[in-house]
Image (spheres, coloured by chain):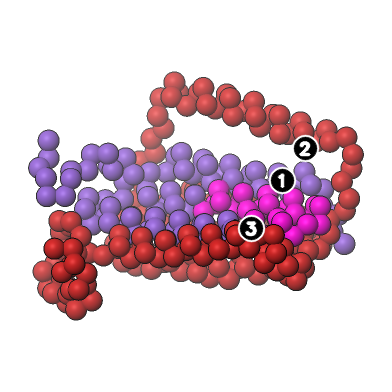
Amino acid sequence: MPTVPLEYGMLLAAAVTLVGLTGVLVRRNLLLLLMSLELMLNGAAMAFIVAGAKWGQADGQVMFLFVLAVTATETGIALALMLRFHHHLRTLDADRGGQAEPPGGTKG
Amino acid sequence: MDTAFYIAGIIAIISAVAVITRRHAVHALLYLTVTLLALAVAMYALGAHLAAALEVIVYAGAVLVLFVFVIMMLDVRAASRPYGVRLSRPGTWLGPLLLAAGLLAEMIYVLWASPEPAPPIQTVGAKQVGMALFGPYLVGVELASMILLAGLVAAYHLARRSMGASPVDPAETHDRQGHNGRDREKED
């Protein structure tokens, strides 16, 4: 029977989420930005698991499954958007997105 | 089991830091895989066996393969360019940071100064999860299936090359017309 204190589990979840948040704030490459986002979502999912294990309820793992579904959807759409971004702008720089010219339009 | 949790947790944090510091996208992806596997071990040590298995199968198996596909479709050198590290001016993020730090302090206080000691960690089996999933959470399962379908449609729509005026190789367009011809007629 594991006896890990709730605090350490939550600490792990918070650490992974914070590292992911730092990545989102610092990295400008869209691909690495997405990976940092995955880290953040995994940290949140870990918090659900820890809380569910602590109180012996299945709800934590149920929420983990929902997080899993949302993450899979988000990754699929984000990667498709990223491909489109790259086709239009020939770059993966997240900061260039605001300077995108509309398709077929002229640069103003 | 406790030791397994602590070791896996340390490995997860170290490899998570490596993910956001690597320059090469494929290296970062490998470290991300290690992070997910370490988190799966931590979940297993906490008694969440089903979640640990799904973490390996869905995250490390499916989501990361999707990343590998996209890196292969893009130029690997373009995918690995750092594009500089730019933080915005402190004025823009200092306020939210201070407010969020207040919330964090509150959460730490609540976690550490809880009046009653919680019971030891209990194993939650797959059967228990399944009963909850298809009992009180049935609506959530339906919603998850709908969001997955919506994601499928959106990803297909966005990844099509025929949309807009993207610079596409004419030969390639001709090649793909067999797949997209019908959709394009509908659009026109």
Letter of the chain in red = B
Mark seen at residue A10: 1
Q: Looking at the image, do the residues carrying marks 2 and 1 touch, with CB atoms under 8 Å apart? A: yes
Marked residue chain, label 3: A
Whole-percent x, y for residue A8 in the image: 76, 46
Q: Which of B155 and A95 is in front in this view?
A: B155
Mark number, residue B186: none
**What residue do we see at 26% from left, 65% from top?**
B160
Are the two marked residues, 1 and 3, in contact with CB atoms closer than 8 angstroms? no
| Picture coordinates of residue B35, whole percent (x, y) | 59, 58
Would you call the spot at circle 2 few (<14 residues within 10 Å), some (14-19), or many (20 or more)? Answer: few
B95 to A82, vertically: above or below? above
Find residue A87 and report its horizontal and vertical position in percent. 23, 57
User: Which shade is chain A?
Assistant: purple
Return the mark for residue A64. Answer: 3
Say which chain tag 2 marks: B
Disc 1 crowd, CA 10 A, few/some/many (<14, 14-19, 20+): many
CA gap, disc 2 and disc 3: 21 Å
Name the residue that disc number 2 marks.
Answer: B111
